Image (cartoon, rainbow, N blue to C red):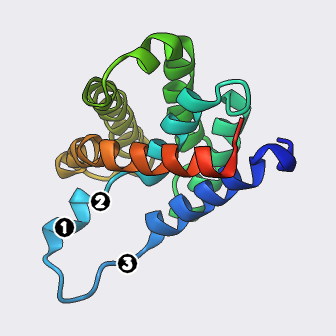
Amino acid sequence: MNPFDGGWFIVVSFIVAFVLTVFQLPAAAPEFLAWLRPSWVAIVLFFWVLAVPHRVGLIVAWLIGFGLDVLLDNPLGLNGFILALLTYVTWRFHERLRMWTILQQGSVLFVLLLVGEVLRGTMLVIVDGRDFPVAALLVALSSALIWPAISMLLDRLQRQVGVR
């Protein structure tokens, strides 16, 4: 990434997504709100692959996934695989997805994250012996619902910063 073309902003947006991922809810908050937390890193990755597919690709997705594995104490490579899968499908169809409305893009993001959450839950059952977290499927729904706001915000900031 060339920092003079706004590459620093891409890095900052991922750092903010990482911080939002580990941000704890207040103790007084109801427990079900934890399941409604969007997949911030996947949303930001989806946006950047759509916006600048020549700069954010599979290698970036793997590296971010490995960082997320370490941050969330998941088996190494799990998030890298899921984010690389999301990136590949988004990159493969980015020209079509750019022409779709923001709600249609949100529905694609929902399906991709739903597949990712099922893969994550299945792998955690196999590797760690955990129960399959059915409520974790709400992550895909909350991510799709917040997609329009995040997309418009990042699009406006991308144009102001000049990310190309």
Residue 70 in which image quadrant: bottom right
Q: Is residue 153 visible?
A: yes
Read off the residue under disc 2.
Answer: 37
Q: At x 24% / y 88%, what residue is drawn?
A: 27
Task: Look at label 1 and name its amino acid.
Answer: Leu
Pointer 1 local density, CA inside 10 Å: few below 14, some 14–19, many at least 20: few
Residue 75 position, x and y percent, is 55, 49
Q: At x 33% / y 43%, what residue is drawn?
A: 147
Read off the residue under disc 3.
Answer: 24
The numbered mark at residue 90 is none
Viewer-side residue, 39 vs 50: 50
> As drawn, is 48 to the left or to the right of 115?
right
Task: Look at label 3 and name its amino acid.
Answer: Gln
Residues marked 2 and 1 touching at CB (< 8 Å)? yes
Pointer 2 local density, CA inside 10 Å: few below 14, some 14–19, many at least 20: some
Q: At x 59% / y 56%, what residue is drawn?
A: 13
> As drawn, is 13 to the left or to the right of 33?
right
Q: At x 82% / y 41%, what residue is drawn?
A: 1
* Mark 2 → mark 1, Cα distance in angstroms: 7 Å
Residues marked 3 and 1 touching at CB (< 8 Å)? no
The numbered mark at residue 33 is 1
